[in-house]
Amino acid sequence: MTGTLLSLGHGYSARALATRLLPLGWRVIGTSRDPEKLSALAETGIEPILFTREAVTEALAEADHLLMSAAPNEDGDPALALAREAIAARAPKLRWAGYLSTTGVYGDAGGAWIDERAPLKAHSRRGRARVEAEAAWAAIPGLPLHIFRLAGIYGPGRGPFAKVKAGRAQRVVKPGQVFSRIHVEDIARVLEASIAAPTPGEAFNLCDDEPAPPQDVIAHAAELLGLPVPPEVPFEEAEMSPMARSFYADNKRTSNAKVKEVLNLEMRYPTYREGLAALLRAEG
């Protein structure tokens, strides 16, 4: 099966999906707000367009698949703010639509395991904005919507090795704290599987099999590099940006069982250990 995918906010995860679809004969149209980035996007094989109402409306008329990955801002979801009427008009003719959200919509679970049935009780401003964006997309009549709630994303260019090599990595310890993660290649694999077997109205958690303390990941990265493991730093004493510190307010173990059951897909990188080893091989 092939088609035309319109990617609104063609970022890191969307680019990973495009690398899987393009060799199969798909047409991928991706947006950018920056005119200077269009040529770089074109070099990846997609058709780049500016994120304007006119360009998006024209592309919608040719798309049969839609992916939304731009984060909400002070005006809500940027794609809906830009072209809600055009999206709603095209919705019944789309074969698949995907919205990339975040597991932050669940808020804090005190370290407990949760799945897609957990209540959406985000307490951060970013999390609440994602809850509102999910609801706004779900309210569009006839849209074959699939919501994907992503855990912490890592992959090529987004791993801990650079900080460990530079001596800037911190093993921040907050007792009992764990995070779920997802390799970007597994995000793309899940999206491709969903496109091949749509289940409109469903939400999926995208994460690996093993939530883990962040200090364990840094320690393993250092061991893979053959470098000294950075010392532990208590959370209260760690030098962190306000945004980075805010992530520690949510503590939960997110289950990916639904992806396995509904989409019949196992993670290629089921833990951070396989994922970091693959990154190290790729980075040489």
Image (cartoon, grey):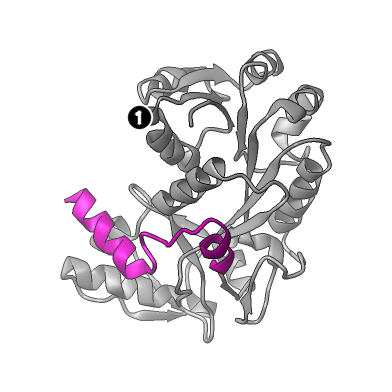
Q: Nearer the viewer, residue 135 or 229?
A: 135
Tell me: residue 254, above or below residue 31: below
Residue 261 located within the stretch drawn in magenta:
yes
The rendered magenta stretch, by its main secondary structure, is classed as helix
Left or right: 80 as drawn, with respect to 225: right
Residue 119 position, x and y percent, is 77, 68
Residue 115 position, x and y percent, is 64, 70
Q: How many C-alpha atoms fall within 10 Å of the one at disc 1: few (<14), some, or many (≥20)?
A: few
Which quarter of the picture shows residue 43?
Answer: top left
Left or right: 72 as drawn, with respect to 205: right
Left or right: 172 as drawn, with respect to 57: left
- The answer, for residue 241, to whether it is visible in the render is no
The residue lying at 66 percent from left, 18 percent from top is 52
Q: Nearer the viewer, residue 154 or 243?
A: 154
The residue stretch that appears in magenta: 256-284
Residue 86 position, x and y percent, is 77, 22
Residue 238 position, x and y percent, is 48, 73
Left or right: 176 as drawn, with respect to 112: left
Helix, strand or loop under label 1: helix
Residue 45 located within the stretch drawn in magenta:
no
- The answer, for residue 267, to whether it is visible in the render is yes
Q: Nearer the viewer, residue 160 or 192?
A: 192
Tell me: residue 147, above or below residue 26: below
Residue at numbered disc 1? 23
Which quarter of the picture shows residue 84?
Answer: top right
Question: How many numbered marks have been drawn onto this rendered protein structure?
Answer: 1
The residue lying at 42 percent from left, 33 percent from top is 21
Q: Residue furthest bottom?
A: 175
Q: Nearer the viewer, residue 168 or 111?
A: 111
The residue lying at 60 percent from left, 75 percent from top is 252
Three-letter amino acid code at the position of disc 1: Pro
Tell me: residue 65, above or below residue 278: above
